[in-house]
Image (cartoon, rainbow, N blue to C red):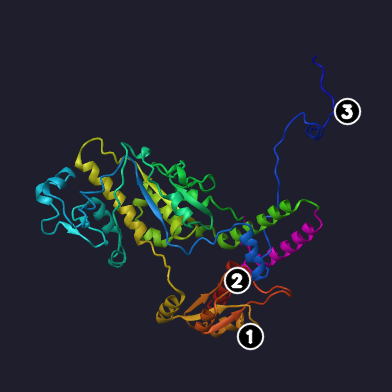
Amino acid sequence: MNRPLRHPNHKRPITRRDFLAQGFISGAAMIVAPSLFGLFKSQAAYAQAAAQCNLSAGAGRIPFVCFDLAGGANIAGSNVLVGGPGGQLDLLSPAGYEKLGLPSDMLPSLPGQVNTELGLAFHADSAFLRGILSKTSATTRANTNGAIICARSENDTGNNPHNPMYGINKAGADGALVTLIGTEPSDSGGNSLAPMAMIDPAARPTKVDRPSDVTGLVDTGRLAQLLPPQDAAAVMAAVEQISEAKLGHMTEDAIVEQLIRCGYVESTALVSAFGNPSLLDPLADTDITTIFNGGELNQDKFRKTASVMKLAVNGFAGAGTIEFGGYDYHDGSRATGEVRDFEAGVAMGAVLDLPWTAAPGPEVWDAVRAAGYRLLALTPAGTATPLREAMASVRHERVAILVGNEGEGLSAGALAACDVRARIAMAEGADSLNVATALAVALYEAGEHRM
């Protein structure tokens, strides 16, 4: 009964490898593929590989950030005005506003009690509004619009299927690093529920509630830190040639080879875009540290706000939810509600004021040229000026560098709008670099001429 079970035709296991091979013990398993993929591929080939591997370009869409105030913040009525069929300013009766928490001497019908700076009618004494105004510039407020949507709710935030993350994803929101993010480890990324019919397990929000969660999304190794862009690109090109040669001798299924290739493509995208670790760090982003002061960034609620806005506004995440707790106001005091509403407003204002741009190309080119910059295009065209020579010709001027995508490059309109067209020297048989690497090489060359 207690005799060992032996495998026919197998020797008695002696070494650890023997025990592993015969299934008597288990061991940790790891499949290791090279972490770098060659960047010296044609534009069409790289674009096709990225598409086949479902890599998202990320930025380019309007950022979407949802604030989930757990407990149920008192937004409508004493903060954002609710009106009749004619809209917000189709005012309710005094008794109606009294039920919403406004005393008789603060009714919206009285002079100075309504603020419409944000394209949305707020009560002038709204703590949400004061928080937003404390962080936004006059330009941001002038470019902001809003709407209030009344929805039926249950008796607690956690019972309300109002979280919009999956709907935004279905509308096309995706990120360069992650699809959706949220500050809570829930299906919605927040405290409120997501509508059951919209939930997609493949798009479940990644939990991000602190700067280290943001920087921890990517580990590019040390190559991009140890070598200048040109040398790093050369190493990647060599690895690509070796890996492609090995794949040519593999007898694995096509799907296995595709998984390996996609591993290279994803690693390439990460190394190219995030070789500088400070690129992702919210606390190293001067746009963010200018909006928040040091004391605020020591508070959890604002650190989580900075983390989500960094990823969502920069296109690294398709959309994000920021959850703040304690909005049930159970102590019954106005003071508690005012403080919490103000803090939520501060976070909302910070997200609104973080710079981002989405505009048609010609508008951007005209604005950049009007600001005193010359436009330099990167293109593989043989008629373009060699990069070093081109950078030398503009070394005493302010220069904006235009790059196109890996599939089609810059449009004819963009090339025509540029003052200088530059090309990077390539190895025979290659017509372009990955766009992020090409830009890194160009910036390096520009810096060399300005030292």
Q: Is residue 73 above or below residue 23?
A: below
Q: Position of residue 279 (x, y in %)?
A: 50, 60
Q: Which residues are magenta?
A: 221-250
Choose mark 2 or mark 1, whichever is in front: 1
Q: Is residue 449 above or below residue 92?
A: below
In the rendered image, residue 269 lying in the magenta stretch gets the answer: no
Residue 8, label in figure: 3
Quarter-of-image position of residue 143? bottom left
The numbered mark, 3 or 1, whose residue comes first in the sequence reads 3
At label 1, counting other C-alpha atoms closer than 10 Å, the crowd grade (few under 14, some 14-19, many 20 or more) is: few
Q: Which residue reaches farthest front?
A: 85
**Which is more toward the observer, 398 or 340?**
340
Residue identified by numbered label 2: 438
Residue identified by numbered label 1: 383
Q: What's the residue at 65%, 69% (across, down)?
A: 44
Q: Which residue reaches farthest right?
A: 9
